[in-house]
Amino acid sequence: MNARSRTPDDDRPPRVRGPFDAATWKEIAYLLINLPVALIGFVYTVVMVASTGALSVTVVGLPLLTCGLWGARQLGKPERARARALLGVRVDEPTPMPGPGRSGGFFPWLWTGIKDPVAWRTVLYALVRLPWGLLTFSIALVGLFVLWPVLPWLVRGLANADRAMVRGLLSPSDGLERRIAELESGRGVVVDTAAADLRRIERDLHDGAQARLVALAMGLGLAKEKLLEDPDAAAAMVDEAHGEVKIALQELRDLARGIHPAVLTDRGLDAALSSVASRCLVPVAVAVDLPGRPAAAIEGIAYFVVSELLQNVSKHAGAESASVEVWRADGHRGGGRLLLRVSDDGRGGADALAGRGSGLAGLAERVGAVDGVFVVDSPPGGGTVVTAELPWRDREA
């Protein structure tokens, strides 16, 4: 955590909310809208439950119930948006109900829809909202003309009850829905990162080694034609082609090192990070303390994170020295974590949110895609410390 100097503003008490400020008028508007919105939801829910209950003994009863529950889910969307706009309550959208094609067939889709907890909680929300909406509408309307001296505090209490109702009945299913959303986002990051790496490899091959090998083939063809007519010129061309071959081989080695270095596969993180540190433009101290080798995927992410951070030190930090520390820590809920810390004494001011998909933001996405944590501490003029935490998975034999 960055230290900061204390200012006179720190001693001021928190800002007191006025009785008739903008937030209060938004709450009054929310309570007045409650009745018509609740009436629509109540009518839909009663008709849906009654019709599907009456038809439950027929073939179309259960599919109709699933469709009705899907419609009840849709009632929650405008309610979450209204609470977000007028009450400041931010509730994540639940995962959409999968269709028959994504559920593995008609009957799995039918069963998934019938036991959908989000839809049933929305049905309960619609049923209890009518009496509550009538109560809040009446109190807010009468209060505007009769109870206005105490109206702000009365409205605030009713709005807090609405906030609790929205959070309790219209939120996703505990942590499961949030976890699904995180995994979907992480999968998207992994796919985008893999596509970007593939484009980079194709570009490097096309612009580098491929173009050089094409020129080499043309040069050798010319040398072959001059071999009998002008042996000295042919020998010079062959010497030049030999130099081009060396350069092309070096470019291919650099490209292979960027994909997955052989030293990482053969000798692990300690040797691989020491090799990366030796190419840094500032002295780097490397300390690796691991009881064994993690899974190849985790090891590769750790290598590329440190490699990218040391490149940033060389290009942007203006540092005189840097250090890399790698160790394993046991998690408090079981399992271990692989911890990385890269620090330098440069100018600081690095921003992990500078741009999505590039720089530190790209590293944060890559680490987050495997349930990792990426933290940047970089006060201006105070150097930079970047810490990454990755899940430890043992390497398969």
Image: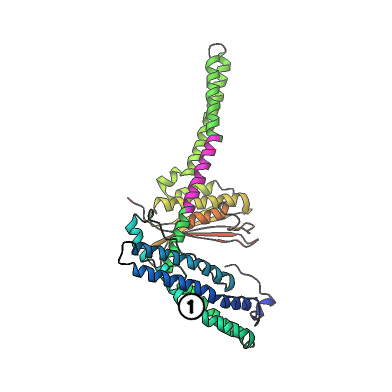
**Residue at coordinates 31% horizontally, 64% vertically from top-left?**
58
Counting from the top left corner in percent of width and height, residue 66 is at: 38, 63
Counting from the top left corner in percent of width and height, residue 218 is at: 54, 23
Q: Is residue 121 visible?
A: no
| Relative to 300, residue 126 above or below | below
Q: Is residue 79 left or right of residue 150?
A: left
Instruction: Locate the N terminus by quadrant.
Output: bottom right
Query: Considering the numbered disc 1 on the image, is that residue within a helix, a strand or a loop?
Result: helix
Q: Which residues are magenta?
A: 188-206
Q: Residue furthest top?
A: 229
**Residue at coordinates 57% horizontally, 20% vertically from top-left?**
236
**Residue 192 colored magenta?**
yes
Q: Which SS type dominates the magenta stretch? A: helix
**Residue at coordinates 58% horizontally, 17% vertically from top-left?**
233
Nearest the viewer among 177 and 278 is 177
Residue wearing tag 1: 130
| Relative to 247, residue 230 above or below | above
| Relative to 81, residue 17 above or below | below
**Residue at coordinates 60% horizontally, 82% vertically from top-left?**
141
